[in-house]
Image (cartoon, rainbow, N blue to C red):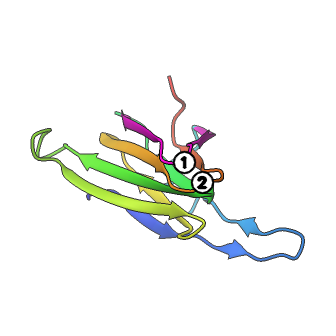
Amino acid sequence: MNGVKLSDLSIINHPKGDIFHALKKSDYGFNKFGEAYFSSIKYQEIKGWKKHNLMTLNLIVPCGNIRVVLMDCRKSGINKPDQESFIIGESNYKRLTVPPKIHVAFQGLSKEMNILLNIADIEHD
């Protein structure tokens, strides 16, 4: 999907607690800082569809596992959208960068806690 990127992230093991890398200004997907927020998703619940017209999302799941489904109607239209699915979180620690105008939905996969961090390039209005 054009503009979508799944980036490897590092986890630095430390005896007093691990350090989870998220995003630095030299990374793909960082345009500028708008806001960062956490969202929780209960087990098997689905949040979606959401589409941001201007915002680039940088999605990281430091706790639990979340299925992220993308639907791209930018070229093909709503009747034949491109779809792609990713599982990110503790089992696959990555950052998913999603450009504007792509529909996004989330599903919590862990029975414990599923926490998503979005580092966005603009503030919600």
Residue that label 1 marks: 43
Residue that label 2 marks: 111
**Residue 51 figure quarter:** top left
Q: Which residues are magenta?
A: 35-52
Marks 1/2 in contact by CB < 8 Å: the verdict is yes
State whether residue 20 appears in this view: yes
**Residue lying furthest right in this view?**
16
Tell me the amino acid under the disc marked 1.
Tyr
Tell me the amino acid under the disc marked 2.
Lys
Camera-nearest residue between 18 and 21 = 18
- Relative vertical location of residue 36 with respect to residue 60 in this rendering, above or below: above
Residue 11: give its label.
none
Of the numbered discs 1 and 2, the one sitting upstream in the chain is 1
Residue 21 in magenta stretch: no
State whether residue 27 appears in this view: no
Tell me the SS state at disc 1. Answer: loop
**Classed neighbour count for the residue bearing mark 2: other residues with Cα under 10 Å, few (<14), some (14–19), many (≥20):** few
**Residue 62 figure quarter:** bottom right
Q: Position of residue 42 (x, y in %)?
A: 56, 43
Residue 37 in magenta stretch: yes
Camera-nearest residue between 103 and 110 = 110
Q: Main secondary structure of the magenta part?
A: strand
- Using residue 78 as the reference point, say whether residue 90 is left or right of it: right
Q: Position of residue 121 (x, y in %)?
A: 51, 42
Q: Position of residue 68 (x, y in %)?
A: 41, 53
